[in-house]
Image (cartoon, rainbow, N blue to C red):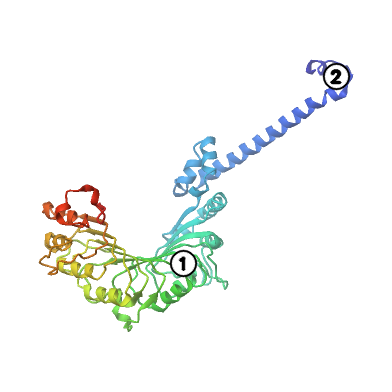
């Protein structure tokens, strides 16, 4: 058929014109495919050209670097919206912000916004001192404006700036809404920052406030956020509070919070404990972890044990998980604490960065956990934390009396008499030991 079309008479050499129609249709489809390939190649060329002009910090972003290797990797990268959903912006100097790279940065951000659909956004913003000094009042840096335009997609938000309030992000009169926001972290929390999220983030589940000296001027703000956030179940906050504000410790209350993580500072600030400011009746999990400003080895016992016990008794919660790390808590105080949490199921003790003589993990503590024997720290032969089924001991000492641990575990592993301690099928209480 094609040979006849090439003859001098052309289409006239084919008596039935309908025989030519399939050839024309195939040719049309091939032309359309070629045009599509040309457009794809042109788009790819422009993308690579823009990528080459971008600052190195932008080019090295994993999602952009992955999609720039080859066409196959590009297709793979574009098929995974989650890798485009993590965005971190750092405003570190006036000179950097005033460069012409802003347009390329905004262009790259737009790529992330589009390619991450339909995922929510995990956003981190860090603004250093004097970074926005050239921005006129009631205005904002264009890159931050671009981020603020997508608050309805924010799923996680971390904000760090000691100098700039959230007005740096939201200078306009319209209050932003955060319908998807579940995780909020504000480093160095200052006044008038939490109210931005009160009543505007109905799905908020986690609030982390590292480096924030509680309560300062945020006590009422935190209570308002608790009251307006029915899904807020996790709070992480520093142990130390700022005494300069002189507040009467009226506890912040919540009947919904399930997990509390306190970043402790060891023995540096006696009687300045944020435990005075909480009443959490539904708490189930409590973590005592070293602060971000945690120093070297502590050389005395935890000075805020009494405010902590007052918090525990005031809240009257049924604690099931207790995690204590790098805290110079005496073994006698720890036993006293455990007596007051009979509902405990999981206990983790890590004595890293605590001198051996101040570690809570001692043979007297282990003896006190024995199911049917008294100890120097517990005169009655009644088991403490009777429901305990998971115990993790991370001990920094070079040597330890392992036999005491074995006896304790064997005693708690059986509901029968001590003579049954050799029957491995009767382990019912302490199911996990590390």
First along the sequence among labels 1 and 2: 2
**Vertical comparison of 3 with 162: above or below:** above
Rate crowding at label 1 as few (under 14), some (14 to 19) or many (20 or more) other CA atoms within 10 Å. Answer: some
Q: Is residue 143 left or right of residue 233?
A: right
Front residue of 118 and 164: 118
User: Regarding mark 2 in the picture, which secondary structure is present there?
Assistant: helix
Q: Position of residue 284 (x, y in %)?
A: 34, 66
Q: Secondary structure at mark 1?
A: loop
Question: What label does residue 231 carry, if any?
Answer: 1
CB atoms of marks 1 and 2 within 8 Å = no
Report whether 116 appears left or right of 294: right
Determine the residue positioned at 54% across, 64% down: 179
How far apart in space, not on screen, are marks 1 and 2 (Cα)? 76 Å
Q: How many marks?
A: 2
Q: Position of residue 327 (x, y in %)?
A: 21, 64
Q: Is 158 above or below relative to 7?
A: below
Q: Is residue 37 above or below residue 152?
A: above
Decide which of 344, 89 is in the foreground and name it.
344
Nearest the eye: 35 or 341: 341
**Residue ID at (13%, 68%):** 377
Identify the disc placed on residue 314: none
The label shown at residue 10 is 2
Q: Is residue 248 left or right of residue 110?
A: left
Q: Measured from the top left, where is residue 279 in percent x and y? A: 35, 76
**Residues packed near mark 2 inside 10 Å, few (<14), some (14 to 19) or many (20 plus):** few
In the image: residue 95, left or right of residue 278:
right
- Residue 307 in sight in this render: yes
Q: Position of residue 267 (x, y in %)?
A: 20, 69
């Amino acid at each position: 058929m094609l040979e006849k079309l090439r003859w001098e008479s052309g289409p006239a050499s084919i008596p039935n014109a309908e025989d030519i129609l399939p050839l024309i249709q195939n040719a049309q489809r091939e032309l359309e495919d070629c045009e599509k390939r040309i457009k794809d190649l042109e788009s790819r060329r422009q993308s690579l050209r823009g990528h080459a002009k971008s600052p190195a910090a932008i080019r090295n972003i994993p999602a952009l670097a992955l999609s720039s290797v080859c066409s196959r990797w590009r297709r793979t990268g574009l098929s995974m919206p989650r890798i485009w959903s993590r965005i971190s912006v750092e405003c570190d100097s006036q000179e950097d912000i005033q460069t012409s790279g802003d347009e390329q940065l905004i262009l790259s951000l737009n790529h992330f916004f589009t390619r991450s659909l339909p995922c929510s956004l995990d956003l981190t913003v860090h603004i250093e001192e004097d970074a926005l000094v050239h921005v006129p009042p009631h205005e904002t840096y264009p890159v931050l404006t671009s981020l603020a335009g997508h608050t309805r997609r924010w799923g996680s938000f971390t904000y760090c700036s000691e100098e700039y309030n959230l007005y740096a992000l939201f200078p306009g009169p319209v209050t932003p809404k955060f319908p998807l926001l579940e995780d909020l972290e504000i480093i160095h929390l200052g006044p008038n920052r939490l109210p931005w999220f009160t009543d505007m983030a109905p799905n908020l589940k986690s609030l982390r406030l590292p480096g924030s000296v509680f309560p300062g001027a945020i006590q009422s703000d935190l209570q308002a956020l608790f009251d307006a956030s029915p899904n807020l179940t996790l709070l992480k906050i520093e142990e130390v509070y700022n005494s300069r504000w002189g507040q009467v410790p009226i506890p912040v209350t919540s009947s919904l919070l399930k997990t509390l993580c306190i970043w402790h500072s060891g023995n540096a600030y006696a009687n300045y404990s944020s435990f005075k400011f909480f009443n959490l009746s539904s708490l189930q999990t409590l973590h005592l972890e070293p602060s971000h400003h945690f120093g070297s080895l502590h050389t005395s016992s935890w000075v805020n044990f009494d405010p902590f016990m007052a918090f525990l008794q005031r809240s009257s919660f049924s604690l099931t998980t207790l995690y204590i790390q790098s805290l110079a808590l005496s073994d006698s105080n720890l036993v006293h604490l455990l007596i007051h949490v009979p509902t405990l199921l999981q206990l983790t003790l890590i004595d890293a960065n605590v001198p051996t003589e101040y570690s809570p993990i001692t043979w007297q503590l282990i003896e006190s956990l024995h199911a049917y024997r008294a100890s120097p720290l517990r005169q009655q032969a009644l088991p403490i934390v009777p429901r305990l089924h998971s115990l993790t001991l991370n001990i920094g000492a070079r040597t330890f009396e392992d036999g005491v641990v074995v006896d304790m575990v064997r005693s708690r592993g059986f509901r029968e008499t001590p003579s049954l301690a050799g029957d491995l099928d009767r382990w019912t209480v302490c199911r996990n030991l590390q």
